[in-house]
Amino acid sequence: MKSGLKRALSKTAALLIVVFVVLAAGAALFLLRGGPAETTTTSAPAIPKKIAVVYDIGGRGDLSFNDMAYLGAKRAADEFGLELVEVQSKSESDYLPNLRTLARSGEYLLIVAVGFLMTDAVNQTAQEYPDQLFAIIDGYIPDKPNVLSVLFKEHEGSALVGALAAMVAANYGCSAVGVVLGMEIPVLYKFEAGYYWGIRYGEQVYKQHTGQDVSLNVLWTYTGAFNDPAKGKTATQAQLAQGACVVYNVAGATGLGIFEAVEEKAKQEGKDMGPPFAIGVDADQDYIKPGFIVASMMKRVDVGVYTAVKRALDYYQKKIDKFGGILELGLKEGGVAISKLEDLETFLELGIQAGTVKEAEKQQIIDKVKAMREAIPSWIWEEVDKLAETLKTNPDVAVDGLKFSDIAAKIPLDSDEIKQIRQQLGVPTG
Amino acid sequence: MERQKLIESLYRFAEIMVALIAGFAISGVIMWLGGYDPIKAYRAMLGTSILTTDPYNLAMTLSFSAPIMFTAITFAVGVRAGVFNIGAEGQMYVGALGAVLVAAMSLPGPLYLPLAILFGSLLGALWGAIAGVLKAYKGVNEVVSTIMLNWIAFWVVEYTRVDLLPNPRDPSKTIEMPEPGRLPILLKGTELTASIVLAVVVTLLSYYLLWHTVLGYEIRATGMNPRAARYGGINPERAVLWSFIIGGIAAGLAGVCEIAGRPPHYAITTGLSNLFGYGFDGITVSLIGANHPLGIIPAAIFVGGLTAGARGMQIVAGVPLEMVKAVQGVIIIALAVPGLLRLLKTRLTRGGG
Amino acid sequence: MAAGSRGAEHLIEMRGITKIYPDGTVALRGVDFYVRRGEIHGLLGENGAGKTTLMKILSGLLRPTSGEIWVNGRKVSFKSASEALKMGIGMVHQHLALVQVFTVYENIVLGLKAEGDARLRIEKLMEETGLKVPLDVRIENLPFGVRQRAEILKMLYRNVDVLILDEPTTNLTPVETDELFETLRRLKNQGKTVIFITHKLREVLEVTDRVTVLRNGRVVGVVETSKATPQQLAKMMVGREVVFTVSKPPREPGEPILEVRDLWVRNDLGEWAVKGVSFTVKAGEIFGIAGVEGNGQSELIQAITGLRRPEKGRILLEGRDVTGFPPSKLYRMGLGHIPEDRQGLGLVLDMNVAENSILGVQRGRRFMGKFYNLLWSSIRRHASQIIERFAVVAPSLDAPVRSLSGGNQQKLVVGRELSKEPKLIVAAQPTRGLDVAATEYIRKLLVDMRTRGKAVLLVSADLDEVLQLSDRIAVMYEGEFMGIARPEELTREQIGMMMGGYRLAGG
């Protein structure tokens, strides 16, 4: 048996050993020439000159969540003279190594983890590197002095687009509204809850204005992915077939498929404008398919990231003595908002940068969006704005006996709580 | 004879070197065309994974080589039996599911790990055996059946994650493996757990099995010449079935180790995104390693190193992930091509028999 | 010019041909080979003497390491078989290069430009040469002899002047062989030149004009056939006097070991291949089954050795019903099987000598430990013993069997099966394609086994072999036995009749 092992070794392993010897020799050469690992340990008091943004498996190019995080980081880097390093993740197994690799270098003022999915990894790394500052977008880590959890009141913004969706749908005589979501994570429950509440609120308002009773079916689908437009498209087509004429995108890059499906349906019916409409998310996505995206629930991740960087700088400059904690951004703080025509310009830049929009088309797009908005009765827009003001000042406003503040109080929501909310608002519980 | 062996070894070595150089050269051109500095990128990639003395990076490389070492064994044992078992992906999913099922039970602490290993490998074996039975006794093409079973496994496991065993704290993943059921971390502050030890042990065991047991002998004889195997008193159908079962165990263990030995999740995450792809990576690892367990170990470490080096490329050389994936894909394919061609050649020439 | 003048006498001149294969094997060591225009030239030698290599060089399939080739007074250097074909040299291989699913006609014109009168030309060729072939039948539906004629026709259609035939009679019946020889003579009369590769003395003497004898990559002599004797040629070929008869001490047969009763077996196509065969093989006897190949012998053997399930009838081993038992069980009960297809069935060519030495007994107590582990030291000892006892020439125990010559592969199979100390040995075509020395050796082994009290079932297409070795003979024709008799009771003519389907009178 021993000789058997030896023979097999001689046959296969010999050459592989040679490979490794060669590789090792290469390694030696590499390292002698200075080596790639730039592990210069910076002396303590100087303020690090770099910031890092780590994306989850959704990644850049979604024209929403992740790209907005980039925008915020870019703005902060430019303003404060910092170097920006971006790291994307191929799989969930990459989060921890990505964060650790950045943290252990000690070169970064702040490491921003973009996305709820990185919560565990940030938690772990923050514990191991207590001197490194972290920010996590959408993640809830309340008890670490070196972690800033940036949260958004998506339920507030979602309530606005929910009301809009309901009124638009009723206005065009549709029987349903829908929402297509990404992975089932608790952050999305906030979108769901606010949206459903807003829909019922919108029905109420519509009745006040027109005297018509409307009762919309509410459709929702979790696609399980933030980066799969094909899935988004199929899910949307199914909802459109069931009578939905407004579909809310809560699915990152998957949402690009929602837009496509909506546009296709409208064009099949010979229209160059909705209905059906989609509702954009995170960024102002109204320009992506102008005329088919009625509005966007802007979640200003850029504001969140920018604020976190600024706070880290302040902390280093001893302007504040506590970095960690929760930073919650809502309507009041400008963290969430429904898109306005005026927002379009800023976000068109994003599209131009990504190459999805041509500079020359800019004005045309703005005109088209404007026309679409004007096609919808202005009282609807006014009611949406009114709701925004109401929620800022009086969150106790109720529909179907459910106060908006009740929803807010339950956050973070778990799967049982969202089921309960769905039931209360007459949405299929799934 | 010795001379002939030496010539063959040198030939193989030259083949690997040529493939390696070609892979790096083609990728280099791609990067250069994309406006990135290939030298800097390669230095960053290898210098943060394999060609380094930094224990953290070496540990990361090893941690990424563990799952693909397991799944490479799945493919290699199949090849030895003359089948093209590309079902490691699905077998790994159900293996992970087995571990999560155990994690969901309330058990005395020390029982979690052994039960997870047992359950996961059993489910993996079972999943492999389905394709094995279909192949051996019904003549169903194993490529087709394993691909289909991969997707069935995907949705079954995804369903379980969403509806049966979601984590109440965080429904994006399943219930976590409790603390006592986790594989120990070998080097503090790294992701390297005892997974790698298990992977190497299983790889060595598979070597022992193939070359030092009767079953391995019968599997190999069947793979090389099923008619002669039958003449030799071997039941080729049973040998093929065994190869699927053994492969399923290895892949199932890959799944178990990702649950019990991959910080920080210790669970199946949404869309199976912490498992997805390891089964297919195993195929290329096996091909690079000449479908031989002793070749698979260095091959897995190399491919694991590429995965680990993806960070360095992004952070140090500023190459975006999409480009990193393209570069590594080209290198891996270049390395796997000679083995793949050889495999196809023997399969085609043997096609008549 | 010297070469030119000789060109008049010799159509083909190969001078100082040496061939060293990439793995270092020296196949030819400075061979001079001359063929006259319009003769039938025999190329005689044992297996591995270099005959086929030499002819592959002449027909452009291989390139010599050194040496020159002159055809018709011109020096040539072929890079491919098609170049040789253009010079009028064509080779018919042992494994015919025909497309199975094409008809004869399609095969003949394959790769040539369509010509309107192709069919007429082929028919005319058939008329002239006597090579009668049904043009519109698919190759797969034709017997081997007819396929071979189609291949020759294909060469002639391509205007070949020099026809090389590599062991053309291996798969032919005696009648077909006679027909082939007739054709060759006719071709000669039409001015064609034929090179005839063989190791069968009788054929060389019957059909050739001159013979070149090769041994171990060298020419040992060129003789006029009319002046040669079989003994002389045999001596040149093997380098010593050959004893053509195996001494067989008399022995009384003992208990019946194998009994076959009214056995019916189907072939792969579902047709009856064995139709109600019954016989008994006793301890200490060789029971020979003669017959033209393809008359059900293979299926009969497969049924007896557990490789094919019989439809009806019973097989008894030492009185125990073993019908439908798998091979592994039969081996444990004392069966040794030397299969007719040693490369496809008897050996795993890519496994090494040691691994092949236990095929079939891998689960034996000698080779398998408690934990189903292989006892390699014991296996290697076993393999070394086989190599030593049965004179297998192998570079090492770790050499893949593929690298062994055909004779040594067969010796390894025979050695392995005999070393099982079986009670019953089933030997199918045990000496096919082997050289004289190996043939003689293996025949002697079989006789030894019989003398030591084993039962031997011998199936062979080589009539001489069956006649010499067997204590009793059956002749098989279309799935049935035409008769069973002792060899000395039969004349060659009687056997020939039985092979052709006539029952033995009173048998």
Image (cartoon, rainbow, N blue to C red):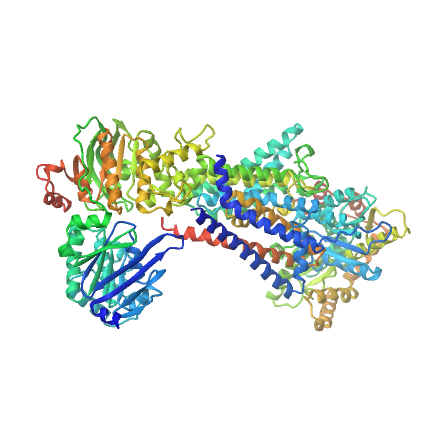
Q: Quadrant of residue B34?
A: bottom right
Residue extending farthest front = C2
**x then y, percent, for residue A238:** 60, 55
Q: Nearer the viewer, residue C198 or B92?
A: C198
**x then y, percent, for residue A140:** 77, 45
Q: Quadrant of residue C137?
A: bottom left
Residue C287 as seen in the image, left or right of residue A287 = left
Asked if B341 appears above or below C328 in the picture, the reply is below
**x then y, percent, for residue A306:** 81, 56
Q: How many marks?
A: 0
Q: Nearer the viewer, residue A266 or C44?
A: C44
Residue C61 as seen in the image, left or right of residue A9 = left
Residue B112 as seen in the image, left or right of residue A141 = left
Asked if B23 appears above or below B96 in the picture, the reply is below
Q: Is residue A181 visible?
A: no
Q: Nearer the viewer, residue C430 or A63?
A: C430
**x then y, percent, for residue A357:** 69, 68
Asked if C195 appears above or below C395 in the picture, the reply is below
Residue extending farthest left = C505
Q: Is residue C472 visible?
A: yes
